[in-house]
Image (cartoon, rainbow, N blue to C red):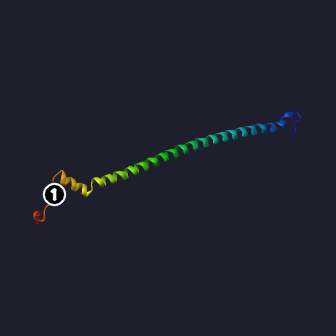
Amino acid sequence: MDNPINPKAAASPDTKAPIALGFAVVALWIAVVISALAVVYTTHNVRVSTNSLAQAKAESSELQLQWGQYLLERSTWASYSRIEKIAAGELEMALPEPEEIIVVQQ
């Protein structure tokens, strides 16, 4: 299939192959760079999310501790001995004697 009139015509398919190969190499390099940037971006997002999670867990632990302290304080303030002490001391209340108790019936 040699062309006697135009000898370059027979060589043209061979010259197109290196150009196509060059474009393929450039396209692959661009894909590799984009992939590397995506890995960096994803890694950064994972680190930020992990840091946020660690802070949220620390805050949760702190709140759990405060909740336990509030429950303890509430039980202390509502203890029967404290209420009886306040009733007797500040309000001057006393338990009635058995003969002072009146039972109401319907």
Instruction: Give the image location of residue 21, x and y in percent.
Output: 76, 40
Quarter occupied by residue 95? bottom left
Q: In front here: 97 or 11?
A: 97
Residue 90 or 28: which is nearer the viewer? 90
Identify the residue shown where x is 60% and y is 41%.
40
The N terminus: image quadrant:
top right
Q: Nearer the viewer, residue 78 or 93?
A: 93
Please state, as top left, top right, bottom left or bottom right, where the C terminus lies in the image: bottom left
- Please report the residue visible at 75 percent of the width from the left and 37 percent of the height from the top: 22
- Dot 1 amino acid type: Ala
> Dot 1: what SS?
loop
Picture coordinates of residue 88, whole percent (x, y): 18, 54
How many discs appear? 1
The residue that mark 1 highlights is 94
Disc 1 residue crowd, few under 14, some 14–19, many 20+, Cα 10 Å: few
Please provide percent x and percent y for residue 52.
49, 44
Above or below residue 57? Residue 98 is below
Q: Quadrant of residue 42?
A: top right
User: Is residue 83 rendered to the left or right of residue 69?
Assistant: left
Q: Residue at x 46, y 48 (%)?
A: 58
Coordinates of residue 92 in the picture (x, y in percent): 15, 53
Is 67 left, or right, of 4 in this rendering?
left
